[in-house]
Amino acid sequence: MSSNYTIPQEHGILVVFSGPSGAGKGTILKRYFEDNPPAVLSVSATTRPPRPGEVDGVHYHFVTRAEFERMIAENGVLEYNVYNGNYYGSPRGPIEEELRKGHDVILEIETNGAGHIRRMFPSALSIFVLPPTFEELKKRLIGRGTESPEEIQARLEKGRKEIEMALDYDYIVVNDQVETAACRLAEIIRSARWSKKFNQSFIQEVLNNA
Ligand code: 5GP
């Protein structure tokens, strides 16, 4: 057998990417996608209003509550959750289509949604982003200056609870430096192609022909 054998890949990997507010998920992903073009980021739907600079269809699909509830009723979301009083969900159609094309799809979602995905798709890969220290997280949240002191406090408290959930994920990415963190993410996704949970049907196929 040739030494550069690769497993025939039937579909892309579904990657769940979570982490507390301020951990740098968005920045890491931006860097990751620059070097890994066939991978796609799922654009979530949300009922929260756009922040300055956010573009409909790019950062989120901004929808009304009625529209979101219709999506739920029509089985149009792979998972959804209510976060800070707003619905957030991952639209099913585009995700399934990209996976079928063999592209990896990354869902940047909070920990409840991630739990749903893990239960529904055991072959999904789950990755949690951590700051190097909790103090650093605090510094970054204060530094970005987009939230009031009360909101920062609330996000830190939520962040602490979210970090406890890191234990349920397959991997962690420590974000001490964006470039390094994006490389770590790439290494994890590359090695996932060889993980047993992503290759059940291949193992079975070899056995079927034994
Ligand atoms: P933000 O309002 O700051 O953009 O997002 C708030 C939280 O919602 C973040 O933790 C983000 O990862 C999460 N989130 C964004 N899209 C989705 C989604 O489609 N489903 C779930 N469950 N969470 C999401």
Image (cartoon, helix red, strand yellow):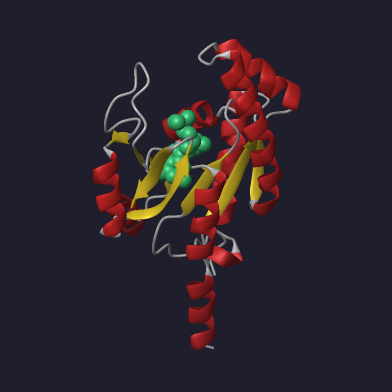
| 180 in relation to 139, above or below | below
The N terminus lies in which quarter of the figure? bottom right
Q: Position of residue 155 (x, y in %)?
A: 60, 27
Q: Quadrant of residue 143?
A: top right
Which residue lies at the image location 33% right of the left edge and 34% below the top edge?
Answer: 60
Which residue lies at the image location 54% right of the left edge and 84% below the top edge?
Answer: 207
Q: Can you see residue 37?
A: yes
Q: Position of residue 44 (x, y in %)?
A: 36, 41
Q: Position of residue 177 (x, y in %)?
A: 64, 23
The C terminus lies in which quarter of the figure? bottom right
| 175 in relation to 2, above or below | above
| 202 in relation to 63, above or below | below
Instruction: Describe residue 166's horizontal placement relative to residue 54 as left or right.
Output: right
Instruction: Describe residue 190's horizontal placement relative to residue 107 as left or right.
Output: right
Which residue lies at the image location 33% right of the left edge and 57% below the top edge?
Answer: 96
191 vs 14, nearest the viewer: 14
Q: Can you see residue 209?
A: no
Which residue lies at the image location 25% right of the left edge and 52% below the top edge?
Answer: 70
